[in-house]
Amino acid sequence: MAIRLKDKETIQVVYKQSEVVLARPVIITMLALFLPLYFAVAFDQISQFKWLLFLWILAVTIFALYQYRSWSSHNYTVTSQRLISSSRDGLFRQTVTEIPLTDILNVKYRTTGVFSTLFEYGNIEIQAHGLPEPMVLERVRDPESVKDYLWKLHEAYTQKAGKML
């Protein structure tokens, strides 16, 4: 998704979900592909179930592509003036939320569980004026440094905007 920038606005950084979150769908995909094939070969049943195996492989491939597309479509763009969260769920559903940097009230992060702590990813919650609930940047790598960067950018932009008034 292309972001339309405002006058004198530049993209600072784009965050994505950590690649580690793909581990679960990859494991499920590998097991779903190889276990039926293993048993079909082990019991010499490939010729009897070839169409069923073909349909199964097609379904598992569609699942894997859907999981990858879902992961890759979550983008969190930080510009010189705002924070933009965009994601695509399914074929026809897109969600875009943006927060002006001056409207940020609080930024916090959360890691839950051994896996996210071990691989250093977590959720970042940004509370802002006008949003009934916080914007959540899901499963971002190194959430502490992202939180610190967002807060520093907010402070710098707020000071700059205050001097212009």
Image (cartoon, grey):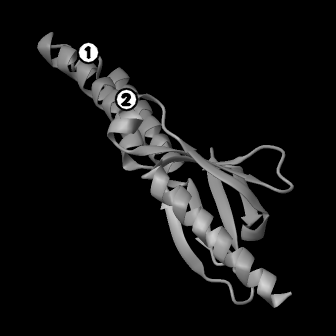
Which secondary structure lies at badge 1? loop
Which residue is rendered at x = 67% and y = 63% of the image? Answer: 84
Which residue is rendered at x = 66% and y = 71% of the image? Answer: 155
Please state, as top left, top right, bottom left or bottom right, where the C terminus lies in the image: bottom right
The picture places residue 37, in percent across and down from the top left corner, at 23, 22
The image shows residue 145, relative to residue 30, as above or below, that is below
Q: Which residue is mark 1?
A: 48
Mark-to-mark CA distance, 2 and 1: 44 Å
Question: Which numbered disc flags the more N-terminal residue, 2 or 1?
Answer: 1
- Viewer-proximal residue among 39 and 63: 63
Which secondary structure lies at badge 2? helix
Q: Which residue is mark 2?
A: 114
The picture places residue 80, in percent across and down from the top left corner, at 64, 78
- Viewer-proximal residue among 85 and 57: 85
- Viewer-proximal residue among 38 and 25: 25
- Viewer-proximal residue among 70 and 54: 70
Q: Residues within 10 Å of mark 1 (few under 14, many from 20)?
A: few
* Amino acid bearing label 1: Gln
The image shows residue 123, relative to residue 85, as above or below, that is above
The image shows residue 66, relative to residue 112, as above or below, that is below
Rendering quarter of residue 110:
top right
Please state, as top left, top right, bottom left or bottom right, where the N terminus lies in the image: bottom right
